Amino acid sequence: MKTPKGVLFLFVACFFACGMTARGEVGFSFSLTTQTSPYSFIRGPQRGISAFGDQAILVSTMPTRTEKVEFDSLYTRAKLSIRVEDTDIVTPLPMEYSKYRDMRLAYEIRKEFVDETVKGFKAAAQARSGEGIAIDVPFKIKSKTFRRIFGGDNIGLRVQGSITIDGKYRQQKFDQLQAANQRNTSNNFNIDMTQRFTIAGKIGEKVQVDVNQDSERLFDFENSLKLTYTGDKDEIIQKVEAGNVSLSLGTNLATFSGQNKGLFGIKTEAKVGALKLTGIASLERGQKNRQKPNESARRASWSENDYLQNVYFWVTDTTITTSDGTRTVDGYRENYRRYINRQHVNPSIQLTSIDVWVTTSASGTQQGVETSDGFAVILQNIDSLNLPRGSVTTSQIAVDGTWRRLTPQTEYVSYPELGYIRLRTPLQSDVALAVSFRTADGDTFGSQTVGPDGVRLVLIKPRTAQPADPTWNLMFRHVYSLQTTGIQDPENFKLKIIRGESVGGIEEEGPDPSQTYLRFFGFDELSTTGTGSDGNIDNMPSIFNADLGEIHFLDLTPFDPSGYMNAAGQHHQM
């Protein structure tokens, strides 16, 4: 494959520029003149910015050496000395107080500059970690037909994951023995590559491409490739899916739910008035077989504290009305505890859109990335969003700084009908999270667009979350990962919940002999015939997500039960 000359020139130029940048950051320099002082603040500034301080790394330092400054009673002269314990190792240096003051001030200014610069480098590197590779087309599509079909002119790609390559080289020599092939040297070189990555691409606002690949999966059909077109609400074609698709025949009014997964083909959903149509043409990839291994099934264990952290967040936990009484938003966390046949009940006030922002140390305009200065406050202090910039200080109930807008579907998925979001990558523990949203009544909370004074947002998580924070309950703590994804055949999936600290040290599969913990927590209430339990987890989206490999307890605090309610308002306490 030939490399274009322009690309090669750009690579060489970038490599040369990076080499000069690296040289500037290390700041490796030294002087061979005799005008070098042992005192730190007297030495002149070195070239570049060094993480080792303002001195060249060839200057040796002694851990027990101390610098001491003494002044006379009138503060007109200063005497500098360097000591190890109580012994002077350098002849004390007297100087005028004014000269010492100027040199000391210059030293402190430079030291502060170096410290802040190095801190900025580390913060920027930490902010970029975990975001994967982002590729955005730097130009806009001018075709009106393109924008009408795809719902926009932006094209972007996000790649996250890891590729590990292990190489092993082995050489054997036979000095005394001779092999049958008359060679006395054997060379072996083995390469083992493991790849786990996800690719999320977007064309406009309507087309989404998702790829999930894992070389450690047993079968190729467990890897997924999916292209999704989502139409507007008033279009006849509502959704078109190509690749790995599924067909669900469930209903909210019955306990039966028939699903077919592991299909590869195309599915179309259309709507004409009140009539909804679903068509699918696919083939089933793989072959269903039942096999009972010799007790070698994969067994994952966790404690009550191993819930999925910094992934799921509610927008609110209680109903809030603004001080002027003009805007009201529902308590989505409390409403999440209400079910009909173990399916969530929609709240009285639903959301129509949710925008998600996170704090970042990066500033300025970047292609495909929207950043803005501003601040976020908790929903209880929503009236504070009308205050000017600078009137809010960062705390556990407010965060002021630079924010980055996350890309919908690519970096997060919102569920406005139930008032929560799911991040595709767990949020870092020292990053703040905020949202702005609009209700079905037309009420807005937070900035829908960036204003001249920045953004105003609703705080969901401060930089460092504490149990006493008003936002502590906004994070899901009842979702647990099964440590695998893409479970293609839920019927053959077996889940057991075992308590390992029962009386006598014997593992316990239920609170009493009449029921298992699977049934106790509401995971097993149906069998293949539709009634009774069968010892397997029920394939219902509210408790079991086979694609993401997650189980959701009905109780939001399952190991400190607060209970949940059915449609009649009856409270279920575990």
Image: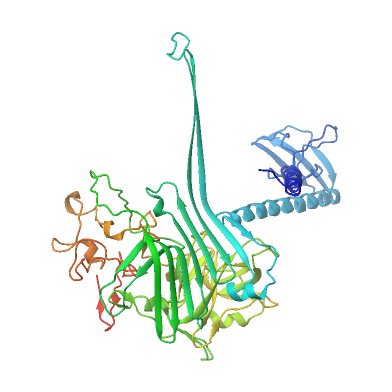
Q: Tell me the quarter of the image containing the C terminus.
A: bottom left
- Residue 217 vs 334, above or below: the answer is above
Compared with 568, 102 (above or below) is above
Depth check: give the residue in front, 530 or 372: 530
Q: Looking at the rendering, which quadrant does residue 132 occupy?
A: bottom right
Q: Residue placed at 66% from the left, 62% from the top? A: 137
Relative to 430, residue 22 above or below: above
Residue 127, horizontal then vertical, whole percent: 60, 57
> Camera-side residue: 530 or 66?
530
Residue at left 70%, top 77%? 452
- Note whether residue 469 is visible: no
The reply to whether residue 147 is in sight is: yes
Q: Quadrant of residue 552?
A: bottom left
In which quadrant of the rendered image does the N terminus lie?
Answer: top right
On the image, the x and y values in percent for residue 2 come to 69, 43
Identify the image quadrant of residue 550. bottom left
In the current view of this chain or complex, which residue is farthest to the bottom? Answer: 325
At x 15% / y 62%, what residue is drawn?
512
Q: Nearer the viewer, residue 504 or 199?
A: 199
Q: Position of residue 265 (x, y in %)?
A: 42, 63
